[in-house]
Image (cartoon, rainbow, N blue to C red):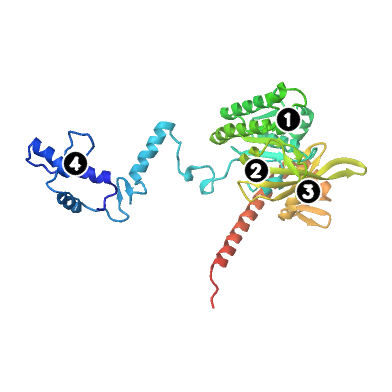
Amino acid sequence: NGYTNSRQMLQQLACHSVRSNINTSQRVSHRRSLGTFGQPNSRQTSLSFRSIEGVRSYAKKAKKPKKGEVTEEGSDGEFPSNSSLEKTIKSIESSFGKGTIVSLDSHVGADGQPIPVISTGSIALDNALGTSGFPRGRIIEIFGPESSGKTTLALHVIAEAHKTGGKACYIDVEHALDPSWAKKVGVKTSELLVCQPDSGEQALEIVDMLVQEGAMDVIVVDSVSALVPKAELEGEMGGHHIGTQARLMSQGMRKITGNLGRQNKTVLIFINQIRHKIGIMFGSPETTSGGNALKFYCSQRIDIRKTGIIKKGETPVGTEVKVKVVKNKMAAPYKEARFDIDFDRGISKMGELVDFAVDTKLLEKSGAWYAYKGEKIAQGREKAKIYFEQNPQVAEALEKDVREALKERKNGMGEEMDEEEGNAAQPEEE
């Protein structure tokens, strides 16, 4: 008869029961003949009517909720009201703590708020990532062939964190970190914490403890392929331990990800190596070690490859590197960046600065001459790099302008795409 459920009707009947002057024996006879409406096996609640038609007529007189009307139990019995939702949220917070459930507007990055990041040390890679660096509170994977620049890129991220007063920890699982190279890249070795764990379980436990503490800005694990489970260490050489490393990484990702997101401060970088699948005739046979868990939990995956060697005469002085963002949860993926790695200082930042300054028209180029703010500074790209190296304040100001110009260009491209989509959605007039 229009009620939300039978229980609500019975409660209404219990509140407005018809009082009759029938004695106890008559009530018992009425229950046997007509039936009792109320709670089963309850002697206190006894509802009796002289006929079943009386029950029906009483139910028809009650107010029937309109369609879409919000009642105590919800709209049409499907969606809870605001008051009941607030009660539920308060109950959740009292059980699991305040802030357990919040609106999306209060989340980091909502309403155009900038996502906290740490620069990679490369202007080209920061631009390709779309976030001007690696985001805090996320997992990053850097993988590629041997000698492609994986460790160098991770050390540059640590150096950028040290520039802003941050702290970093390097989990050297491979036992191959070179302190002299770290100094050349710009890492403050006196402030860098280094750990060389005995097993994979120990390494991931240390990472989890550092993440929970929330004091680290960057944690680098070098590398996933060198994380050896205890079962493999305790077993014999050549023994089969199928899937042990994959299970270890899967469990580690489940434990670490939640703590990392709650702290929202640490950039966790996993360096990984490349392996080849056997018997693959079509497609790429390349894969990364450690199973598939890391691929799913990563917010950004960086594929770094060496494309050439830079020489001065016959002497190699650096390498040309191509980086591809194969996964990106923070911006558009599949963008590429190219930069040089010098053997005496790491990523050639001044070379990138000169190229991007010319591209954004902040640096004027006429023939072989370079001019900055109307004043000629050098003839040739190499001499322009030397000029900015000798004038770090000028280079810092130019880098800031270049990054702003790239950001404005990206925002402008986004607005143009929105306009094109809007024009495409409008029907053409006949």
Callout 1 crowding tier (Cα within 10 Å): few <14, some 14–19, many ≥20: some
**Residue on which disc 2 sits:** 300
Q: Give the residue type that dot 2 points to.
A: Gln
Q: Residue at x 65, y 41 (%)?
A: 295
Percent of width and height locating residue 281? 78, 48
From what the image shows, is residue 74 above or below residue 419? above
- As measured in the structure, the alpha-carbon distance from the residue carrying label 3 to the one carrying label 2 is 29 Å
Q: Residue at x 26, y 50 (%)?
A: 3
Q: Secondary structure at mark 4?
A: loop
Disc number placed over residue 36 in the picture, else none: 4
**Residue on which disc 3 sits:** 281
Q: Tell how many labels.
A: 4
Disc number placed over residue 278 in the picture, else none: none
Q: Nearer the viewer, mark 2 or mark 4?
A: 4
In the picture, measured across the screen, residue 215 lies left or right of residue 381, that is left
Q: Nearer the viewer, mark 1 or mark 4?
A: 4
**Residue on which disc 1 sits:** 226
Q: Nearer the viewer, mark 3 or mark 2?
A: 3
Q: Give the residue type that dot 4 points to.
A: Thr
Percent of width and height locating residue 417? 60, 60
- As measured in the structure, the alpha-carbon distance from the residue carrying label 2 to the one carrying label 4 is 66 Å
Q: Nearer the viewer, mark 2 or mark 1?
A: 1
Q: Which badge, 1 or 3, comes first in the chain's sequence?
A: 1
- As measured in the structure, the alpha-carbon distance from the residue carrying label 1 to the one carrying label 4 is 74 Å
